[in-house]
Image (spheres, coloured by chain):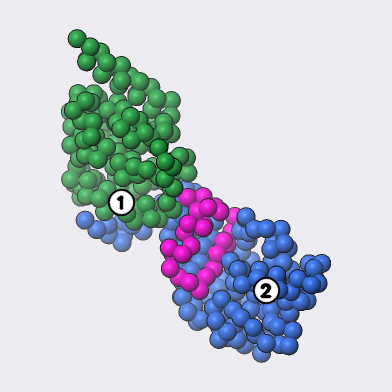
Chain colours: A green, B blue
Amino acid sequence: MQAVTIPPFELFYEEHRAEVLRVLRRRLGSDRAEDAFQETFLRALRAYRRLEHGAHLRAWVLTIAQNVALDTLRRARPWGELEDSGAEDAEPAYAALAHLTDGLPPKERAAVVLRYGYDLSYDQIAAALGSSPNAARQATSTGVRRLRRRNTP
Amino acid sequence: MTVSSDLDRKFRDAALALGLVDVGFDVVDSPIGPLFVAVSGRGLAAISFDTDPDDHLERLARIAGPGVLRSSKAVDRAHRELDEYFAGRRRAFDLPLDLRALPPFTTSVLKELARVPYGETTTYGALAARVGRPRAARAVGTVMHRNRIPIVLPCHRVVGADGDLTGYAGGLDCKMRLLELEGAR
């Protein structure tokens, strides 16, 4: 893949903030969306200098938003089971490979799609998932193994 | 869906408070017109009469890292010192300067420039002599022209051998006003 320069964070933020807020509002409602918005862009900024290229930043930040939303919902219902509805809003990151990755747990699906759909590094995936690069690698390989098992007759 | 200015500010403040910003910038008002001001973790990185961020952000990112974010708080201290200077209450700036990624000649010229006292002028040739390159007046002129931190690094105090103002990034009017402010003209 040809290297795409990483834009200064300000430009990235200005380009994506409205869409991120829209996605989070739909998922969490207005009040909780504001905290999640901040958390999304703080996670993105924390990981920003480790990015290896500037490709697919939209998919990347929407995946971060998706995972912040999941964390928010989980915190709200610590004892309840969280239904797996993770995919519906994060179209850019998930849609392309949705037919292949349907049924994977949200983190594994995000990891597989970001790795093989968007060619992101484990550092970038880790930032999107709010985990370590090792955990991102783990989630990717577990997801791939699960898919192989499923697709093996 | 627009992001409210309140939410926007909260994010910018939090990013700065958490130490995640490589360079904070803003455009501030001054008696000589609006100024683009940028501050990195090392200090003041840019002042410019060209206030379009697009003309600066890529370069700042190359020098200090991609975490470039507009933040009035990041430039707060620089803004305050500039206000005091323009009000005639400050003769020297206390801000540390970020002079990363400059060639050695440029760095030594700027260090000498920083020692030209408030309210006095010097010439390109004299500055060249002080860095041990007496014939490099023209090269010193180029360094002045490219000065990333005008006003604080006082290139307005450098004039031609015959006393002509010669040139200034903010315009000759501006150079004259700064010298008048300092009582040098």
Q: Is residue B122 left or right of residue A4?
A: right
Residue at 55% x, 73% y: name it: B82
Chain letter for the residue marked with disc 2 in the picture:
B
Residue at point 61%, 58% (across, down):
B98
Locate the C terminus of chain A by quadrant.
top left
Q: Position of residue A43 (x, y in %)?
A: 39, 42
From which residue to which does the magenta span run?
A: B42-66
- Tell me which residue sits at (27%, 16%) in the image: A148
The answer for how far apart the CA atoms under marks 1 and 2 are is 42 Å
Residue furthest bottom in the image: B185
Q: Quick check: A72 left or right of B85? A: left
Asked whether residue B184 is drawn in magenta, I would say: no
Residue highlighted by disc 1:
A16
Q: Is residue A149 above or below residue A50?
A: above
Q: Quick check: marks 1 and 2 in contact, CB under 8 Å? A: no
Can you say whether A146 is above or below B2 in the image? above
Tell whether A37 sits left or right of B164.
Answer: left
Task: Note whether residue A65 is visible.
Answer: no
Residue B87 drawn at (x, y percent): 56, 81
**Which of the 4 image quadrants contains residue A108?**
top left
Q: Which residue is mark 2?
A: B141
- Secondary structure at badge 1 equals helix
Q: Residues within 10 Å of mark 1 (few under 14, many from 20)?
A: some
Depth order, front residue of B4/B114: B114
